[in-house]
């Protein structure tokens, strides 16, 4: 068995909030019946697309930046083991402590033990896809520790006992009247006369969070990037809550997927241009926080970095699928996807929704556990055009569809088709026989009816190419 920094590549696939309770088609069918959801999604994604397109259009070298970002990610994945060891060495030299977690259970155990060691029973959290992936909030609650989300959208989701439905805007499926109801019902000390004006709602959240920031001694964050060369971690955010979490507490625990590395400090130049434009439609993030280990008398005096595998080694071993690890979590692919815009993120049954979720979640868990997700796409290619690091999502989807367990009937039909196409006389006879489908209509009978349940059977031409050629 091959290993990746001591962790088997066939190791426990990812666990946590990655597996759906029902198939995508069933969940999408329910979502399509929610008119309010579709209005919320349509308005939000159109707004983000327009804003992002405007700032991207300002850069004459955008395509060159995309190419550079893609090349840097490919180089990082090719040298990931040595770069991770370099990161560990530099974080440790700067006063931090590095922990390795093979899966979600191990990562949750490490974080819970670190919090217990401080004697605290509450943590403040920076928005983090990795901690959502492993179900950290649920694990902390089970250990008697209260996690408090400080990102406004994440706070809305948490107070609403909900799940995120977008990478960038987790509460994209909620409108302001729904948010008001959640705050009135769940937020301690909220004004009963609260209105649904955005400024008023934000003010209520600010008052609630300010006390929490000032009285909580432990914070948990994710990381957008980690620099192997210096041991520096970076978090990019728009509200300032991250800056509060990263500077005020005495102890900071960062949970980071092992793929978030960049080799050198200079490499950040590329990604700090790509990420804000592709995600929030800004030229730069309002808050870009970076820290290297521990600085005496300034910021947290105890820093722990938990490096999370949780199925990533298995993804890295797939020469086609490993592109999914290039993702910088910008959400650009969600904002242009016609499927996501109509179904929303909950239909994907994973913390990673949309096109990137359709390729990442099945690989992290094993394709058989999320077999319907590779089909949650029309293969239009809009996601590839929008991706700031050029992840070829359509090609990965096709690759994963080939990995999905197929019914015996389908396998038999594909073998028969391959045999027919390999024998010219038989293929010619099949072409003539296909003309009979005009009599059968545009639907196939069972057991082939599943194929035509959502598409018309193409009408064959009245004359085959071979017949046309013979006449001429």
Image (cartoon, rainbow, N blue to C red):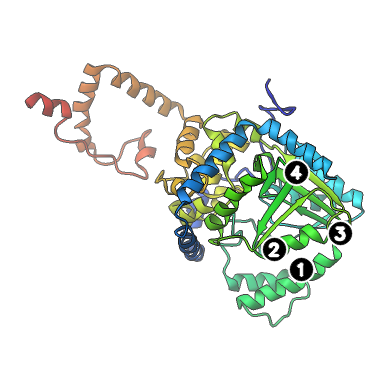
| Tag 1 and tag 3, C-beta contact below 8 Å | no
Q: Position of residue 57 (x, y in %)?
A: 44, 59
Dot 4 alpha-carbon crowd within 10 angstroms: few under 14, some 14 to 19, many 20 or more: many
Please name whichever residue, 174 or 27, is drawn nearer the observer in this view of the structure.
174
Q: Which residue is mark 2?
A: 155
Mark earlier in primary sequence (2, 4): 2
Q: Position of residue 470 (x, y in %)?
A: 10, 24
Please name whichever residue, 348 or 327, is drawn nearer the observer in this view of the structure.
327
Disc number lying in front (3 or 2)? 3
Left or right, 178 with reference to 299 = left
Q: Which residue lies most toward the left here?
A: 471
Left or right, 14 with reference to 254 = left
Disc number lying in front (2 or 1)? 1
* Element class at badge 1: helix
Name the disc covering residue 209, or none: 1
Name the disc covering residue 217, or none: 3
- The residue sitting at 66% across, 38% down in the picture is 14
Q: What separation in Å lies between label 3 and label 2 (alpha carbons)?
A: 19 Å
């Amino acid at each position: 068995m091959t290993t990746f920094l001591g962790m088997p590549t066939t190791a426990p696939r990812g666990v946590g909030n990655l597996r759906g309770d029902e198939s995508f088609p069933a969940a999408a069918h329910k979502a399509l019946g929610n008119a309010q959801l579709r209005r919320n999604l349509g308005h939000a994604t159109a707004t983000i697309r327009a804003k992002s397109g405007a700032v991207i259009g300002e850069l004459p070298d955008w395509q060159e930046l995309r190419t550079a970002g893609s090349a840097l990610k490919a180089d990082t994945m090719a040298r990931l083991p040595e770069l991770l060891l370099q990161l560990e060495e530099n974080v440790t030299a700067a006063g931090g402590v590095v922990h390795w977690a093979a899966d979600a259970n191990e990562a949750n155990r490490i974080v819970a033990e670190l919090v217990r060691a401080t004697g605290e029973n509450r943590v403040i959290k920076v928005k983090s896809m990795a901690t959502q992936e492993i179900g950290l909030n649920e694990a902390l609650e089970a250990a008697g520790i209260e996690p408090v989300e400080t990102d406004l959208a994440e706070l809305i989701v948490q107070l609403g006992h909900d799940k995120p439905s977008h990478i960038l805007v987790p509460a994209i499926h909620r409108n302001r009247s729904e948010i008001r109801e959640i705050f009135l019902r769940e937020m301690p000390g909220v004004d009963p006369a609260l209105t649904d004006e955005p400024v008023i709602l934000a003010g209520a959240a600010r008052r609630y969070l300010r006390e929490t920031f000032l009285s909580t001694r432990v914070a948990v964050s994710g990381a957008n990037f980690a620099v192997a060369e210096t041991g520096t971690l970076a978090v990019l955010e728009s509200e300032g809550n991250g800056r509060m979490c990263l500077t005020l507490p005495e102890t900071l625990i960062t949970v980071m997927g092992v793929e978030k590395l960049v080799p050198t400090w200079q490499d950040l130049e590329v990604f700090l241009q790509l990420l804000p434009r592709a995600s929030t439609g800004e030229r730069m993030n309002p808050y870009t926080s970076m820290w290297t280990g521990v600085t005496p008398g300034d910021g947290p005096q105890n820093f722990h970095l938990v490096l999370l595998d949780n199925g990533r080694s298995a993804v890295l071993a797939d020469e086609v699928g490993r592109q999914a690890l290039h993702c910088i979590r910008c959400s650009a692919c969600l904002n242009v996807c016609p499927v996501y815009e109509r179904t929303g993120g909950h239909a994907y049954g994973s913390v990673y929704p949309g096109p990137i979720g359709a390729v990442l979640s099945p690989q992290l868990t094993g394709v058989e556990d999320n077999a319907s997700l590779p089909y949650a796409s029309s293969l239009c290619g809009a996601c590839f055009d929008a991706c700031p690091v050029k992840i070829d999502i359509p090609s990965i989807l096709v690759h994963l569809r080939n990995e999905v367990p197929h019914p015996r009937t389908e396998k038999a039909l594909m073998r028969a088709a391959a045999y027919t196409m390999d024998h010219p006389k038989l293929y010619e006879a099949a072409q003539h026989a296909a003309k009979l489908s005009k009599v059968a209509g545009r639907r196939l009978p069972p057991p082939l009816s599943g194929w035509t349940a959502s598409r018309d059977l193409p009408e064959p031409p009245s004359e085959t190419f071979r017949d046309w050629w013979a006449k001429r």
